[in-house]
Amino acid sequence: MRNKILIGLLLTVMSGTVSAQDLTMPALQGYKKVLSYPVFGPDKLWNFINGAADTYLAYGFIDLHVAEYRKGKNVIKLEIYRHSDNTMAFGIYSTERSPSFRFINIGAQGYEVDGTINFFKGNYYVKIRTYSKSEKTIQSAKSLSQIVANMLKGETKMPEALSMFPETGKKVNEETYINESVLGHKFLNKAYKATYEIGSDNFSIFILENKTSGEATETVNAYLKATGMDPMGSGSGKYMLTDGYNGTIFLAWKDNQVVIISGLSKDQSEIADQYTSDIIK
């Protein structure tokens, strides 16, 4: 699997679609910019982030530029990860954020915590950090984050698909994008996820992206087959499934849209119907 991902991404880079050298790291007033790191491509990312590399590759990683800014003993490190598109950049960003972080107005969305500033914009995921406790250094890191945000091209908004999630009960800043193996199933891919809390009930809603209605039907039939049910034809439908790994699942689809709800019990079909009806018009 790892080799397949590498081959696909390497072909993309080699085709000339994206150049790994077309990103210039900005200057920061009062600091010496140090460019001692190479540009990391898919085949070298393990050299920099080791065990986390597989996750980044699963989200369409293209290349990584790294720079350090030094002033005496104070060091600020800048990492700019480029991914294949905005959705993938949001996806990797969403895996590393927590709703407990302090969110700031930068890029499409960003946060700061303990000397770290992370944000995404367009198809870039940016990480800036310093271990210095100096307030001046921390302010310099914030200044650098704004410089980088202004420098990078791309939209400064969240993925449009997130607007499909109903607002009632939705937990703030817990939306994610899962590119592969939704709910642990290889046949479920490319899903936006939001988590909900209604009273004592906690559940998750997944909206799967499909290019065509035929692709959606294939996804639904694969899930039905995996849970011992007969496959259905094209069109639309609603089912309650028993998933051996995830318990009760409510599944609904129409045209090219598939909605999955997990975390509700069998006697809560009314809640599931309400939410799926809000999404699938």
Image (cartoon, rainbow, N blue to C red):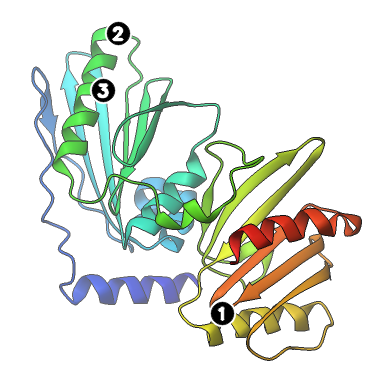
Look at the numbered disc 1 and give the secondary structure of its residue: loop
The answer to whether 114 is drawn above or below residue 49 in the figure is above
Look at the numbered disc 2 and give the secondary structure of its residue: loop
Left or right, residue 266 beside residue 176: right
Q: Residues within 10 Å of mark 3 (few under 14, many from 20)?
A: some
Left or right, residue 96 beside residue 136: right
Q: Which of 115 and 132 is in front in this view?
A: 115
Q: Position of residue 21 (x, y in %)?
A: 12, 56
Q: Position of residue 2 (x, y in %)?
A: 47, 69
Q: Nearer the viewer's eye, disc 2 or disc 1?
A: 1
Q: Which residue lies furthest to the right in this view?
A: 267
**Which residue is at a point 9% across and 31% down the rendered structure image?**
27
Q: Where is residue 119 in the image (x, y as percent from the top left)?
A: 34, 38
Which residue is denoted by mark 2 in the rendering? 134
- CB-based contact (under 8 Å), mark 1 and mark 3: no
Left or right, residue 22 beside residue 105: left
Sequence-wise first label, 2 or 1: 2
Label placed on residue 74:
none
Left or right, residue 242 beside residue 209: right
Sequence-wise first label, 1 or 3: 3
**Which residue is at a point 37% across and 21% down the rendered structure image?**
115
Quarter of the rendering occupied by the C terminus: bottom right
Which residue is denoted by mark 1 in the rendering? 255
Residue type at numbered disc 2: Ser
Q: Quadrant of residue 82?
A: bottom left
Sequence-wise first label, 3 or 2: 2
- CB-based contact (under 8 Å), mark 3 and mark 2: no
Q: Marks 3/2: CA distance?
A: 13 Å
Look at the numbered disc 3 and give the secondary structure of its residue: helix
Which residue is denoted by mark 3 in the rendering? 142
